[in-house]
Image (tube, grey):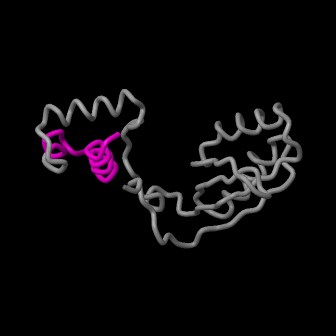
Amino acid sequence: MDAIDRRIVRELQADGRLTNQELSERVHLSPSPCLRRVRNLEMAGIIEGYAAIVDQEAYGLPVTVFLQVRLDRHSEENVRLFEEAIRKIDEIMECYLMAGDRDYLLRVVVASLGDYEDFIRRRIHKIPGIASLDSSFAYGIVKKSQVLPG
């Protein structure tokens, strides 16, 4: 990726609904080479897709919880079962494999604290191999960006 590709990606991250004409003007290219670069970025997997950015609270899911998970053992089977189960749970928006004293960090969204309790009891507790859970509730957002740096 060169500097022009990075500008294209940043503009599309900021507004994925830009027309090719608008995008080409913003990155100072003519429309044809701009479209060719966008298609190349898509084919290379740098641009994975396009999506609407939805206000989580307005959608009815105002509670964000960061759930730290530690597994009881790190066998290949235990890890596979855990990760397969996590991929199937819609309330889990992101799951990161972590270094340190916790194995995974999950970002979970729910409508209420009662829904979170239900989520833990009915979804998480049923996953075998979990040694411990630690929940942290977000009560505000300081920064949230969809645009990668430079």
User: Left or right: where does residue 49 sit relative to residue 61?
Assistant: left
Residue 18 x/y as whole percent: 22, 45
The residue located at (68%, 41%) in the rendering is 86
Q: Which residues are magenta?
A: 1-24
Q: Considering the image in quadrants, where does the N terminus appear? A: top left
User: Left or right: where does residue 54 sit relative to residue 2?
Assistant: right
User: Left or right: where does residue 143 sit relative to residue 110?
Assistant: left
In the rendered picture of this protein, how many numbered marks are placed on residues? 0
Q: Is residue 9 in the magenta section?
A: yes
Q: Is residue 34 above or below residue 92?
A: above
The residue located at (31%, 53%) in the rendering is 14
Q: Is residue 22 in the magenta section?
A: yes
Q: Is residue 91 above or below residue 63?
A: above
User: Left or right: where does residue 83 sit relative to residue 21?
Assistant: right
Residue 115 x/y as whole percent: 66, 57
Residue 80 x/y as whole percent: 76, 33
Q: Main secondary structure of the magenta part?
A: helix
Q: Considering the image in quadrants, where does the C terminus appear? A: bottom left
